[in-house]
Image: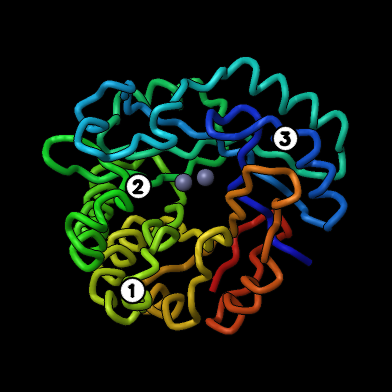
Amino acid sequence: MLPADNHVHSEWSFDTGEQASMAKTCERAVEIGLPAVAFTEHLEFTDWVDDDAIAADGLELGWWAKIRPIDVAGYLASVEECRQRFPGLRILTGVEAGEPHMFGASVARVLASGAFERVLGSLHAIPYDGRLVAPDKLFHILGTREVMRRYFTDMVRMIKDSDAFEVLAHLDYPRRYWPAGAPPYREADHEEEYRAVLRALAGSDRVLEFNTRSPLLSVDLLRWWREEGGRAISFGSDAHLPWVVGGRFDLAVDIAAAAGFTRGRDAYDFWRR
Ligand SMILES: [Zn+2]
Ligand SMILES: [Zn+2]
């Protein structure tokens, strides 16, 4: 039995294309036997425009240029419709809050409605030269080692300064964009930094995400999570397209099991040790 997919985007996230569809994603989830999906749409508050100084510096805006607020009413109506259409699938509401430690009041205002069940915390950007910048844009300026060091340091800050989220999403996100010419990424090179993040997360009794869109975490890293006091894992495909939901979960559950985690009290629960 596959675990719940707790990190999925639909047409209600600003960075999904025309093929994104909540209904088609649910259809696919039923087809592959997922017990539950959480539609965790992007909640971002960085507001950049095309002629921002950041672009003038040669740092492309990328998806940052497209940031839009969530249409909460439309989103909730869509979830309700899917719940009617797919009664055998548990559908959770949710958000993926970007840099929640920097936008505490804004995040709190959206969450205050109580409409969101699954809240992820993500670090998509780090401060550089007085602005927030996507970390992969800094690789060629600061070097990979320094970018990762800053990223993990900022992530510890995010965990300590924000209690708005329950699940820490993609903890080594810049790794997705590792430059071709750089030495291969090795978790062991960053063990102390990972441990600092994991310790802070475990200390507030929160949940580590196993993100299957990023390079898969290793058994060693999940062992560090246990050793630092971590108790629970959330699986997330980070799908932005219907057919990606539950992607690589077969591999991820094997890795989690090898690290001593197992399914929780029911099919919808996090995996626990
Ligand atoms: Zn993300
Ligand atoms: Zn995401």
Residue 54 in the image: x percent, y percent? 23, 32
Q: Earlier in the sequence, mark 1 or mark 3?
A: 3
Q: Which residue is mark 2?
A: 123
Q: Are marks 2 and 3 in contact (CB under 8 Å)?
A: no
Position of the C terminus by quadrant: bottom right
Q: Secondary structure at mark 3?
A: loop
> Which numbered circle lies on residue 263?
none
Compare residues 124 and 114 and report the one nearer the observer: 124
Q: CA distance from mark 1 to mark 3?
A: 41 Å
> Which numbered circle lies on residue 228?
1
Q: CA distance from mark 1 to mark 2?
A: 21 Å
Q: Which residue is mark 3?
A: 19
In screen coordinates, is 83 left or right of 249? right
Amino acid on which disc 3 is placed: Gln
Residue 161 in the image: x percent, y percent? 23, 43
The answer to whether the beta carbon of the residue marked 3 is less than 8 Å from any atom of ligand 2 is no
In screen coordinates, is 63 left or right of 34? left
Amino acid on which disc 1 is placed: Glu
Residue 124 in the image: x percent, y percent? 36, 45
Q: Secondary structure at mark 2?
A: loop
Q: Nearer the viewer, mark 1 or mark 3?
A: 3
Q: Residue drawn 64% across and 23% down?
A: 75
